[in-house]
Image (cartoon, rainbow, N blue to C red):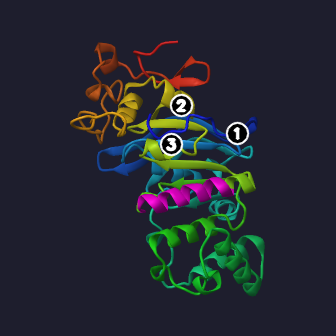
């Protein structure tokens, strides 16, 4: 793929042990017709110091997966399965336990910082609040630390910016402030939900470089959510591809790009523009993501390889090559 550095990222510490293990995760919501399942049977893990990129179209369940890790699934939602973090199952946690964990051990960067931040509180006060709640710092000490954090994420004149309100900052600076807030308590896991989507290409690159730099400095693990394979190729050790609420391919990043096995993953990579290849028009995956998945393989209606078994039976996720998992009847070990 043009533009991708094929040199592997530094080996993640996943070999030491998994920080996060998600098993048979389900997220559903009550509707008039019954419960609508938005995430079904999802399995993955993240090692210490590892970055997992979760990729898929809008509506595939990426964000709900991330919100379930934070205990922030909207009212009416039900989370099932296991989310094991540091050995304990977060699905069974009380609201009090979530408040203690959220922001301290697991932190999240949201897609649009303007809506994620409080518009009537200064940026510095919002960051300081995290430190007073989780670290027990005094108001003055927490504010001083907030200024240091703003400086650490590359915001100029941090002492002044700490006294500004979110609307007074540019989009890139607001996202940097969100990163400062997320990293205030040195979390073990950072969940980044499309943190560069609303930014121009130059600022996107700066934010990605910042996340990589901070990860190297702190040793934290990262779950990076995006619909853009080109973005995730720059920072992920491993990639999980989701479609219609399920995982369809899970492998180290170099395997996903060098040898994609699921037809949907191949389609996603084919849609990426290649400056070295002249084409009349970009490739488009035919059809659209169905709101209510049909019986059998959820990608079958859009897949050129689909046959009767695809329409009748949902394929299990199998290890078809070493450390390369695929859910497709047409791909066998």
Q: Which mark is residue 54?
A: 3
| Mark 2 Cα-neighbour bin, 10 Å: few <14, some 14–19, many ≥20 | many
Query: Where does the image place residue 238, in percent across and percent down from the top left?
Result: 58, 36
User: Is residue 66 shown above or below 256?
Assistant: below
In this rendered view, identify the residue nearer to me: 7 or 216.
7
Residue in the picture at 52% in, 72% down: 173
Query: Where does the image place residue 265, in percent across and percent down from the top left?
Result: 41, 31
Question: Is residue 235 visible from the viewing direction of this image?
Answer: yes
Query: Where does the image place residue 239, in percent across and percent down from the top left?
Result: 54, 37
Q: Quadrant of the N terminus?
A: top left
Q: Are marks 2 and 1 in contact (CB under 8 Å)?
A: no
Q: Quadrant of residue 199?
A: bottom left
User: Is residue 311 shown above or below 293?
Assistant: above
Q: Are marks 3 and 2 in contact (CB under 8 Å)?
A: no
Helix, strand or loop at mark 3: strand
Helix, strand or loop at mark 1: loop
331 sits left or right of 176 in the view:
left
Q: Quadrant of residue 156?
A: bottom right
Residue hosting label 1: 12
Gap between marks 1 and 3, in whole Å? 16 Å
Q: Main secondary structure of the magenta part?
A: helix
Q: Quadrant of residue 12?
A: top right
Q: Nearer the N terminus, badge 1 or badge 3? A: 1
Magenta-tinted stretch: 199-214
Q: Nearer the viewer, mark 2 or mark 1?
A: 1
Q: Which mark is residue 250?
A: 2
Helix, strand or loop at mark 2: strand
Q: Nearer the N terminus, badge 2 or badge 1? A: 1
In this rendered view, identify the residue nearer to me: 318 or 265.
265
Gap between marks 3 and 2, in whole Å? 9 Å
Residue in the picture at 52% in, 47% down: 79
| Mark 3 Cα-neighbour bin, 10 Å: few <14, some 14–19, many ≥20 | many
């Amino acid at each position: 793929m043009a533009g991708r550095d094929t040199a592997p990222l530094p080996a993640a510490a996943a070999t030491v042990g998994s920080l996060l293990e998600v098993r048979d995760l389900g997220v559903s919501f009550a509707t008039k017709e019954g419960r609508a399942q938005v995430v079904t049977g999802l399995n993955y893990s993240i090692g210490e110091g590892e970055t997992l990129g979760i990729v898929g179209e809008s509506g595939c369940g990426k964000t709900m997966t991330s919100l379930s890790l934070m205990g922030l699934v909207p009212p009416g939602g039900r989370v099932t399965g296991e989310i094991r973090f540091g050995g304990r199952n977060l699905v069974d946690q009380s609201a009090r336990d979530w408040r203690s964990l959220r922001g301290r051990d697991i932190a999240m960067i949201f897609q649009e910082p303007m809506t994620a931040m409080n518009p009537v509180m200064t940026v510095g006060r919002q960051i300081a609040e995290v430190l007073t709640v989780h670290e027990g710092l005094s108001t003055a000490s927490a504010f001083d630390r907030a200024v240091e954090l703003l400086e650490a994420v590359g915001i100029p004149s941090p002492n002044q910016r700490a006294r500004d309100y979110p609307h007074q900052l540019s989009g890139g600076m607001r996202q940097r402030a969100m990163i400062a807030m997320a990293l205030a308590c040195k979390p073990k896991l950072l969940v980044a939900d499309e943190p560069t989507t609303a930014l121009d290409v130059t600022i996107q690159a700066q934010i990605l470089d910042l996340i990589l730099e901070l990860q190297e400095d702190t040793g934290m693990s990262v779950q990076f959510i995006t619909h853009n394979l080109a973005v995730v190729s720059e920072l992920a050790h491993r990639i999980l591809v989701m479609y219609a609420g399920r995982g369809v391919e899970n492998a180290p990043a170099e395997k996903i790009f060098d040898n994609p096995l699921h037809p949907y993953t191949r389609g996603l990579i084919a849609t990426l523009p290649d400056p070295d290849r002249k084409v009349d028009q970009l490739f488009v995956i035919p059809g659209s993501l169905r709101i209510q998945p049909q019986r059998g393989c959820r990608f079958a209606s859009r897949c050129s390889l689909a046959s009767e078994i695809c329409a009748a039976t949902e394929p299990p996720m199998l290890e078809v090559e070493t450390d390369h998992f695929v859910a497709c009847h047409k791909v066998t070990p």
